[in-house]
Image (cartoon, rainbow, N blue to C red):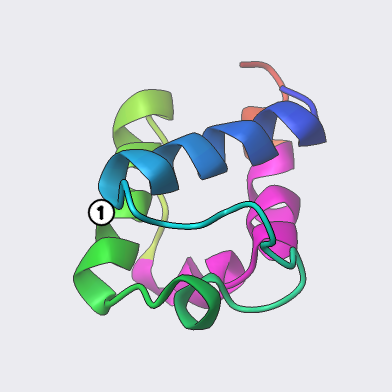
Amino acid sequence: MNKEEIRDVILEIIQDIDEDADISDLQSDLPLRDQLDLDSMDFLDIVMELRKRYKLQIPEADYPELASLDSCVAYLEPRLKDS
């Protein structure tokens, strides 16, 4: 997967978890939780969906790497390059 495809998947997962999330003016370098008012369970749901869809192991210690859209893409790109 390339960066744009990964970005689209993350946004799709966010929309699936929170239908009311306004992703139209999302700033890719700012924390998702702050911009979308996601609570810890919403964030965990995003991580679990990534794990389920792509059979990824994402250790809890790596969760800070998934804070913003940019950091999510950077973290996931090498792990999904063959997907």
Image-quadrant location for residue 59: bottom left
Numbered range of the magenta stretch: 60-77
Q: Quadrant of the C terminus?
A: top right
Badge 1 is on which residue?
A: 45
Give the residue drawn at x 69%, y 78%: 30
Say whether residue 71 is magenta. yes
Q: Main secondary structure of the magenta part?
A: helix
The percent position of residue 1, horizontal first and vertical second, equals 71, 22
Magenta segment: does it hold 74?
yes
Q: Which of 73 and 83 lies nearest the eye of the viewer? A: 73
Q: Amino acid at mark 1?
A: Asp
* Residue 73 horizontal/vertical position (percent): 70, 49
Q: Judge from the rendering whether residue 74 lies leftward or rightward of residue 66; answer left or right.
A: right
Side of 69 relative to 17 (left or right): right
Q: Nearer the viewer, residue 25 or 73?
A: 25
Examine the rendered structure and indicate whether residue 83 appears above or below residue 28: above
Q: Residue at x 67, y 40 (%)?
A: 7
Q: Position of residue 32 (x, y in %)?
A: 54, 70
> In the rendered view, does 8 fall on the left or right side of 74?
left
